[in-house]
Image (spheres, rainbow, N blue to C red):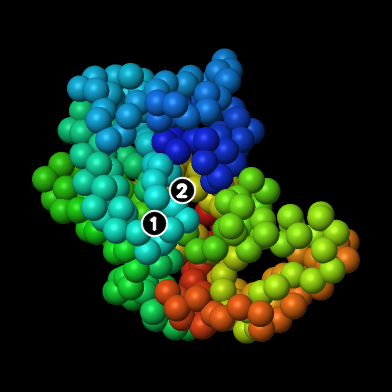
Amino acid sequence: MRIAVTGATGFIGRYVVAELDRLDLAHVLCLRPGSELLPETPRREVIRIDISNPPSDMFDQLGRPDVLIHLAWGGLPNYRSLHHFEVEVPAQYRFLKGAVQSGLRAMLVTGTCFEYGMQSGPLDETIPATPDNPYGLAKDTLRRQLGQLQREIDFGLTWARLFYVYGDGQSPNSLYSQLRRSALAGEALFPMSKGEQLRDYLPVSTVARHLVALATKHCDAGIVNVCTGQPISVRSLVEDWISQHGWTIAPELGRYPYPDYEPLAFWGSARKLNALVGPA
């Protein structure tokens, strides 16, 4: 099996590439012009393609892969930017449609739990999407467009709806990165919200394993939540991270208000994911 990966230099992409290397799977990395160039290996090729303006022989340049793991997405972590549906959606759809028209038979595309919008409690894949911010709207729009494309062209689509991911190499503005930076700087307190939010967090290495397993074994599974299925409060999560790393920093609770673009308590159902690839 030959696998192509977009967004390979991103946070999740680097872990997906490491998982493909670990499994000794042949893969080609599709990098944007100007992005960091990753090294080639006997089982890895690297090419540069502008997703917003791909060449007519793009699928051939990718080596005519059996499946595409599509991670690329610009404009993050600003979830409120109109860039997501004004720029990303049309460019992403043209790229993916072009690949399918050229012969791509299956793809895994990453979505977001923000597609569920402001719905609370446990969320499973049968719940209708009601996105409430531009990023969630853009992802859901792309998913629907690809669903319509499937009516015209036969190809497999797995939509991996990611919940909260953390790990080394994440955006400097992420909760984990901010905590780690403050702890290593020797700060005594970590300012945060009251931490009562219930969320669903997975380490990025586990997310990568799930994505590769879905892409290689279940490349037409529809929507699949990539999550633990177990809610945890943000306060408990921060305290767990501090304990695991032996940091001496302490949470300063109530310093910041809760974000207004997400409900106070929501998490994913992992039943479908576990049925397909097994628990983490």
For residue 41, side relative to residue 139 (left or right): right
Give the residue type that dot 2 points to.
Leu
| First in sequence: mark 1 vs mark 2 | 1
Q: Can I make out residue 176 in this image?
A: yes
**How many marks do you count on the picture?**
2
Give the number of the disc on residue 229. Answer: none
Residue receiving disc 1: 111
Which residue is at the far top? 42
Q: Quadrant of residue 19?
A: top right
Residue at point 47%, 21% (across, down): 46
Residue at point 49%, 48% (across, down): 211
For residue 68, side relative to residue 226 (left or right): left
Label 1: which secondary element: strand
Residue closer to the observer: 167 or 83: 83
* Relative vertical location of residue 228 with respect to residue 231 in this rendering, above or below: above
Q: Can I make out residue 122 in this image?
A: no
Residue closer to the observer: 88 or 3: 88
Give the number of the disc on residue 214. Answer: 2
Pick the quarter of the image with the C terminus: bottom right
Give the residue type that dot 1 points to.
Gly
For residue 149, side relative to residue 76 (left or right): left
Residue at point 37%, 37% (across, down): 68
- Which mark's residue is nearer the viewer, 1 or 2? 1
Label 2: which secondary element: helix
Pick the quarter of the image with the N terminus: top left
* Relative vertical location of residue 75 with respect to residue 262 in this rendering, above or below: above
Mark 1 Cα shell of 10 Å, populated few (<14), some (14-19), many (≥20)? many
